[in-house]
Image (spheres, helix red, strand yellow):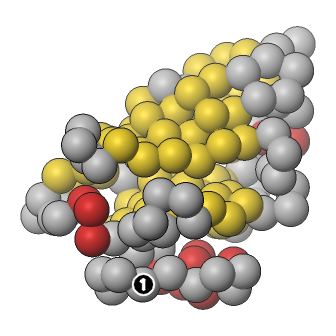
Amino acid sequence: EVQLVESGGGLVQPGGSLRLSCAASGFIFNNYAMSWLRQAPGKGLEWVSGVGVDVSITHYADSVKGRFTISRDNAKNTLYLQLNSLQTADTAIYYCAKLTDPFTSYGARYDMWLQASKDRGQGTQVTVSS
């Protein structure tokens, strides 16, 4: 059974930083590209960032590019998202997700990343407020 457990969320002031973690189990972590998604209050699910099986392959939504950094530690079966220069618009529940098919990622097709991110965790709340 796929299990994804996010942690690291919290309340932070604008301009602050957080580091989210996602502990993965129940599948061969090394074989799957992974995503971070978020859902802001009253809005739909938004794809934020993805990392391929090759850890050097990373992609970001335009809204977070240059501020967020995705990474993975395959030895620890853990996915990370470093959030810097946080803005109030970043307030959301953040989810990590496993892509559906092994050894597959979608380049700059952010719609495909979102569509393929079916297995998600319970999420961690990030609130940016002064």
Relative horizontal placement of residue 84, taking residue 112 as reference (left or right): right
Give the vertical position of 86 relative to 37 (above or below): above
Residue at 88 percent across and 21 percent down: it is 14
Relative horizontal placement of residue 31, taking residue 89 as reference (left or right): left
Residue at 82 percent across and 52 percent down: it is 65
Q: Secondary structure at mark 1?
A: loop
Which picture quadrant has residue 112?
A: bottom right
Image coordinates of residue 43 in percent, x first then y, are 75, 61
| Front-lying residue, 21 or 93 | 21
Residue receiving disc 1: 104
Task: Give the class, few, some or many, for how many residues have Cα within 10 Å of label 1's Cα (few <14, many ≥20).
Answer: some
Give the vertical position of 123 relative to 120 (above or below): above
Residue 110 makes an appearance in the image: yes
Give the vertical position of 99 relative to 2 (above or below): below
Q: Quadrant of the C terminus?
A: top right
Image coordinates of residue 2 in percent, x first then y, are 19, 62
Image coordinates of residue 68 in percent, x first then y, are 72, 42
The three-letter amino acid code for the residue at tag 1 is Thr
Image coordinates of residue 50 in percent, x first then y, are 57, 63
Q: Quadrant of the N terminus?
A: bottom left
| Front-lying residue, 120 or 32 | 32
